[in-house]
Image: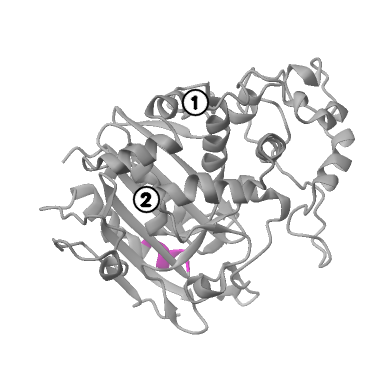
């Protein structure tokens, strides 16, 4: 595999150029430039190519965000290895569980509109869940808040019955399939007492939204999050035809019986089924940068943009979502769970974000609440080396957090 297909894109001052003219390098309205990139970012880009090459990753990209603008980007490898198509600023990745943050925002929108409260029982909207066995009490005791902070006690996986045969779906495809499984599920601990990551919880939240609004969840997010924020190339499900050339393929990297590493191409699109609300978002890095711009309130003094951001969700509501609910483990420096977002402390700095991994893709976004700096990264390869998954991912993520703690 050739490994010379990379590019780094620090932005220069572009003046009042049109959005079309700056698509290739960044999302920028207006574009900005840094006199000097943060030293920890320089360290990250310096290790980026070698780290991915060491773990046989096919392609990946990372971007630095300052006050809502992409100011630098590093691309590596191929979006489509067989056709030698490199990863670039237009490459579309699958953002997997980062989707949960969109779901959380949608629930808070309904809360702010008075359509629900976070203390509502989930069985008020989904009485089918009363079929789940709860040895700790009634299923009526589980609230929407518990689903949003992963403390409801639901199972981690949506579809725990995989046998690896060809006819199995990637994930459940209908609500009826989930309902059929409910009598065979059990709450794992006293609801509200501890953290335990759960994918099904987010399908239940999305189903609640659909009941209250009459909208399909994907359509609701398109209209009420993507459109007002300006995330014009974000979508769910199959890739729109005009974006197909930009969609990255996904790979599973394995060692064969001769010790040779092979990247198995599983194509571009796949069907997350009914699990889209917990992991179905597809987008180029530029759209995730736009998302961070919204989350950090980076309007550059643009009053119209501020009003649009506030219409999506008020700053006070976002601040509420970023209050610690439960620690994610008993480790002293363990992250906390907020409402749909992970909350970390890095060198005394408060960091917010999420990670995702599904179907061969691995992604993350994080930002520093105080400085407005963010880092966005996406990779198209699932790699297992000596029983350990995604070694490269942990290394890049660790360095990205140092970038966010860097005050220079």
Q: How far apart in space, not on screen, are marks 1 and 2 (Cα)?
A: 33 Å
The vertical placement of 229 against 74, above or below, is above
Q: Is residue 300 left or right of residue 2?
A: left
The vertical placement of 26 against 301, above or below, is below
Q: Position of residue 345 (x, y in %)?
A: 36, 29
Instruction: Indicate which label's residue lies in the foreground, 1 or 2.
Output: 2
- Residue range highlighted in magenta: 51-57
Identify which residue, 372 or 400, lies in the foreground.
372
Extreme residue in the left direction: 35
| Figure quadrant of residue 167 | bottom right
Residue at 69% x, 49% y is 275
| 260 falls in the magenta region | no
Identify which residue, 27 or 373, lies in the foreground.
27
Give the mark nearer the N terminus: 1 vs 2: 2
Q: Position of residue 361 (x, y in %)?
A: 54, 59
The secondary element bearing badge 2 is classed as: helix
The residue singled out by tag 1 in the image is 331
Residues packed near mark 2 inside 10 Å, few (<14), some (14 to 19) or many (20 plus): many
Is residue 397 something one can see in this rendering?
no
The residue singled out by tag 2 in the image is 290
Is residue 111 something one can see in this rendering?
yes
Q: Quadrant of the N terminus?
A: bottom left
Residues packed near mark 1 inside 10 Å, few (<14), some (14 to 19) or many (20 plus): few
């Amino acid at each position: 595999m050739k490994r010379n297909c990379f590019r780094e894109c620090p932005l220069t001052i572009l003046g009042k150029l049109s959005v079309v003219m700056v698509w290739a390098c960044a999302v920028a309205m207006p574009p900005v430039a840094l006199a000097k990139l943060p030293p920890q970012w320089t360290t990250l880009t310096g290790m980026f190519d070698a780290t991915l090459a060491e773990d046989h990753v096919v392609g990946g990209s990372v971007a630095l965000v300052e006050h809502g603008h992409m100011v630098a980007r590093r691309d590596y490898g191929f979006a489509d290895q067989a056709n030698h198509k490199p990863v670039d600023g237009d490459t579309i990745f699958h953002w997997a569980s980062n989707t949960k943050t969109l779901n959380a925002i949608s629930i808070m929108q309904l809360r702010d509109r008075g359509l629900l409260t976070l203390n509502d029982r989930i069985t008020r909207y989904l009485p089918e869940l009363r079929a789940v066995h709860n040895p700790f009490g009634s299923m009526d005791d589980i609230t929407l808040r518990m689903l949003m902070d992963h403390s409801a006690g639901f199972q981690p996986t949506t579809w725990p019955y995989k046998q690896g045969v060809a006819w199995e779906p990637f994930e459940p495809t209908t609500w009826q399939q989930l309902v059929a499984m409910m009598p065979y599920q059990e709450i794992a601990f006293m609801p509200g007492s501890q953290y335990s990551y759960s994918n099904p919880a987010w399908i239940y939240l999305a189903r609640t939204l659909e009941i209250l609004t009459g909208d399909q969840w994907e359509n609701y997010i398109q209209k009420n999050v993507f459109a007002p924020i300006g995330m014009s190339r974000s979508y769910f499900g199959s890739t729109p035809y005009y974006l197909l050339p930009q969609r990255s393929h996904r790979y599973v990297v394995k060692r064969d019986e001769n010790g040779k590493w092979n990247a198995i191409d599983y194509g571009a699109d796949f069907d997350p089924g009914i699990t889209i609300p917990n992991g179905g978002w597809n987008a180029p890095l530029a759209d995730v940068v736009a998302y961070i711009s919204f989350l950090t309130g980076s309007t550059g003094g643009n009053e119209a943009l501020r009003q649009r951001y506030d219409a999506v969700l008020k700053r006070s509501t976002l601040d509420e979502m970023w209050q610690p609910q439960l620690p994610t483990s008993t480790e002293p420096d363990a992250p906390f769970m907020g409402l749909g977002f992970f909350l970390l402390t890095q060198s005394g700095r408060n960091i917010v974000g999420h990670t995702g991994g599904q179907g061969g893709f691995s992604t993350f976004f994080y930002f520093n609440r105080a400085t407005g700096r963010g880092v966005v990264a996406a990779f198209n390869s699932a790699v297992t080396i000596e029983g350990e998954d995604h070694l490269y991912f942990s290394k890049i993520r660790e360095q990205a957090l140092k970038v966010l703690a860097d005050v220079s």
